[in-house]
Image: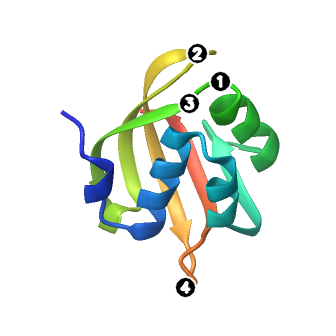
Amino acid sequence: MSIQVNRLSDPAVRAFVTAVNAHDKAAFDALLTPGATMSDDGSDRDVTDWTDREIFSSNGHLDVESEADGGRTLLASYRNDTWGEMRTKWRFTVEDDGRISRFETGQA
């Protein structure tokens, strides 16, 4: 059972999932603060390189199963053309201006 994207609690996280699923790189980039950081399975990665490879060039898609921390932590089924489908956890740091300064993902 997944949560409809438009029902996600945090507006920045909702916009993040929407941009990922629409493969809208411009909208995605606009959501991130300058110098935003991220990690995958505990290792920091270059945001641009990682998102190009894991989301935009490989048809990444998030199906959110549950949310916590006011919508800033997601449990989701993530799939792309490279790795297939896997259960993942996502954590977001959202700044006062509503943009995301860090996200962390990894297998759940």
| Residue at horizontal 60 percent and vertical 36 percent from the top | 41
Q: Which of marks 4 and 3 is in front?
A: 3
Residue tagged by mark 1?
Answer: 58
Residue type (three-letter) at the residue carrying disc 2: Trp
Asked if residue 46 can be seen in this view, the reply is: no
| Spatial CA span between label 4 and label 3 | 28 Å
Vertical placement of residue 52 versus 82, above or below: below
Residue type (three-letter) at the residue carrying disc 3: Gly
Question: Upstream in the sequence, badge 4 or badge 3?
Answer: 3
Question: Upstream in the sequence, badge 2 or badge 1?
Answer: 1
Q: Which colour scheme is used?
A: rainbow
The secondary element bearing badge 3 is classed as loop
Residue 96 has which mark? 4
Asked if residue 53 can be seen in this view, the reply is: yes
- Measuring from the top left, give residue 73's x and y in whole percent: 40, 55
Vertical placement of residue 9 versus 47, above or below: below
Residue type (three-letter) at the residue carrying disc 1: Ser
| Residue at horizontal 54 percent and vertical 43 percent from the top | 20
- Measuring from the top left, give residue 88's x and y in whole percent: 44, 34
Residue 83 has which mark? 2
